[in-house]
Image: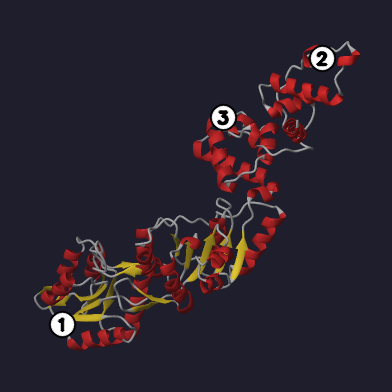
Amino acid sequence: MPFEKILVADGKLIIRKSIADALRAKRHSVVTASTISEAEKFLQRDKIDLMFLDVKLDGGAGIDLLERLSNTPDRPIVIVMSGSPTIEEAVSCTRMGAFDYLTKPFSIAQIEALVQKASVYTQVLNVNRTFSHDISKSLHLIGNSASMLSLKQLIQKVAPTEATVLISGENGTGKELVANDIHNLSSRADGPYIKINCAAISETLIESEFFGHEKGAYTGATERREGRFELANGGTLLLDEISEIPPNLQAKLLRVLQEREFERVGGTKTIKVDVRILATTNRDLKKAVAEGTFREDLYYRLNVFPLHVPPLKDRREDIILLAETFLSRAAKKYNLKIPGFTPRAIQAMLRYRWPGNVRELQNCIERAAILSTENTAIEWEALGISDEELEASDSETIVRPTIEKPSVSHSIPLYTNRETFPSLEELEREHIMRALELTKGNRTHAANLLKISIRTLRNKLNEYKVRDAAA
């Protein structure tokens, strides 16, 4: 990527001109100086990104200027040039922060190679300065269900390509992990991986976050800043929650996706980038297009290769594997020794709907690990899942502590008079109500006491409500 401003400071016109002409041919903006004072004026007036500095200049030694620059923030990358090099001088320049030490005479190819090297260095520096780049190759999707195996196969196919990928799914399903895997399995894995959460940035700042801005572009823009597209050059850009991008920016984003070029806010220079786009959404973008809140052409530009991450309730086979993985991580994180889960805890996890999906499960397990007694399996109660949140199951009942069953005389009244003998329906209702009374309204405990499923109990109670309403 071209540098915004390069300064060539050398006492000889032929050297200044040859370097400047070669760099301008590569679309760099170049200024030249023949003396220390001229060089310092440029440094004070403009933001210089890269500087070629001769060790001997009129008005003072270039090495003295290098030393002064070493103590200033936001200093340029400096490549020192010397016609009479020495090891001591090279070491001294390196200690004062010189990026490289170039011996005269040199070729234009050497100059171009150094500029390319400095460009890569600057980009990595900017990425690390702006973001905590903590994506690990060890982060990957966990699950052996049919839907997850199918998803993993699709990831394997699309990752090596340059295709734009739209990843959909509910919150907490792992859309970002899918994007991570695509980047890590691609040819861009060693390049920058930049994320931008479209829902977390105010509408007034999002354009600047995307494309960067020039100094003075708006109040508070005290210096030029690269946007996320620029920082992701040569790598991957993840547009997280793309459905939240404001309508006025959708047209500009479409242009970047089509042409891979843009202008910074407040700027006129067109900047070209080489970026692969991944996007995530928890909304139905087709519906958003129909409602007029999302551009149809942008949707089709993003939806080149769609991937859907299933909710956890649709891949229950993976719940225990995920829970065990999260427990292992929590135990390591907090230095705990927890052998696993009790059967009741396992059944509860399998019957809970997990509206927060994998993220909710992870948080639940971490909390349970902290609350649990060391060297003791995690109990159902530690999960913080209530009876009423569990889905009914005719074939599977959560094992509960034994509840003392009441005698028949306490369960139903004795009827000795045939004329007042109740019907079977009345006896059933009386029995169920007595069980609910004994368990203080806890339906799950009552169902266990009655040796019926909670679904059957719910159906019976609903029948009673209908009959009462009809009566």
Q: Is mark 3 on a helix, strand or loop?
A: loop
The three-letter code of the residue at mark 1 reads Gly
**Residue beneath the point at 15% across and 76% down:** 56
Label whose residue precedes the other's in the sequence (1 or 3)? 1
The three-letter code of the residue at mark 2 reads Val
Which of the 4 quarters of the picture holds residue 424?
top right
**Residue beneath the point at 62% across and 57% down:** 309
Q: Which mark is residue 225?
A: none
Residue highlighted by disc 3: 372
Residue highlighted by disc 2: 408
Q: How is the image coloured?
A: secondary structure
Left or right of 466, for residue 193 = left
Residue highlighted by disc 1: 11
Left or right of 412, for residue 282 = left
Q: Which quadrant: the C terminus?
A: top right
x and y percent of residue 308 in the render? 62, 60
The three-letter code of the residue at mark 3 reads Ser
Depicted 184 relative to depicted 387: above or below: below
